[in-house]
Amino acid sequence: MIPLGLANVSENTMEVISQITVFFVFPLLWLYVKTNKNNVVFNSFFDKPGRLSWGLIVLATIMGMIFSVGISQIQFYILAHTLPNFLVTMLEDGNVINTSNVYMTIFTFISACVLAPIMEEVIFRGFFLQRMAHKWGIKKAVIISSIIFGLGHFDVIGAFMFGVVMCLLYIKTKNIWTNIAVHALNNLIATSMQFFGGEESGTISITELQAQSNLWIGIGLTVVGLLWLIPYVWKQWRTVKEVGVPPVRFINEQKVVNSSQENEVYSQVIVTDRLMAIELPDEVVNKLRLEESDYVTVSVEEDKIVIKKAHNR
């Protein structure tokens, strides 16, 4: 999906640089700092455990686009008949790619089809999904991260559904490059449609706007998209907790398992009437991919205490 800030790119070179800095450089720098702070290797988000499934990539892109276009048509129809002035203003404010400058056109395509997919997938599916899954559970993480992702786009409903599919796709393949490929192909199609189908100028009338909106086409496309999306989401959703989020590598693996080093990690012991609880460090939680309702086994091997995730209680 294309971020709000890329919908209308200015011809001013300094503004282009500032947009790259704000929308791509700062978020990735922030992510790099956060991953290092949490003892996670930044490059581990880009690990490729297997080959890309191009059949799945193309299918997910096509069906996702059909659903997104259908939802957009429905929203367009509703706004055209309920808030026509708002819709006219939104369209006239600049939702068309500026083709007057070849460099601006190239920048728009690179931003939408290369930079945005990498940045958004690494942050939303790579980092946010990981952190939220460890705090609230993987299912809540999928929903919350997708809501945040959807709020950053014009088509909130379509972007939310896109975010859910991307989360499940990442969990299934454990390969962020699959997500990046789907995201890039999706943005390439959307940007090309704007490039070849947009008009540079002209006043938009409310009557013309309402005549162009077609509710039944939107409903039809949405239904076609859901014919694939619902079975796919349902199938992945049922096993998402057992599969878990893709693992990440840690900067200092020994910090997690070896307590004989000077850099020890201390845990608080809490004793109640019935239970004794030990607060595990974030590194251990991340390493074992623990969630709130999980259980662990504790055993002593030689001079070390070994903690493992219990698959069956």
Image (tube, rainbow, N blue to C red):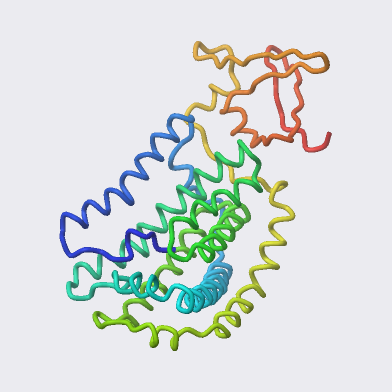
Tell me which residue sits at (38%, 87%) in the image.
208
Tell me which residue sits at (82%, 13%) in the image.
273
Tell me which residue sits at (66%, 48%) in the image.
139
Front position in the image: 84 or 292: 84
Q: Position of residue 179 (x, y in %)?
A: 51, 59
Q: Position of residue 253 (x, y in %)?
A: 53, 27
Residue 19 lies in quadrant: bottom left
Residue 163 lies in quadrant: bottom right
Residue 56 lies in quadrant: bottom right
- From the image, which quarter does the C terminus lie in? top right
Relative height, residue 146 to residue 274 (above, below) = below
Front position in the image: 224 or 74: 74
Front position in the image: 17 or 272: 272
Q: Position of residue 194 (x, y in %)?
A: 35, 76
Q: Position of residue 201 (x, y in %)?
A: 24, 80
Relative height, residue 141 to residue 312 (above, below) = below
Tell me which residue sits at (34%, 84%) in the image.
205
In the image, taking residue 18 as reference, residue 60 lies left or right, namely: right
In the image, taking residue 27 as reference, residue 258 lies left or right, namely: right
- From the image, which quarter does the N terminus lie in? bottom left
Relative height, residue 260 to residue 28 (above, below) = above
In the image, taking residue 107 as reference, residue 129 lies left or right, namely: right
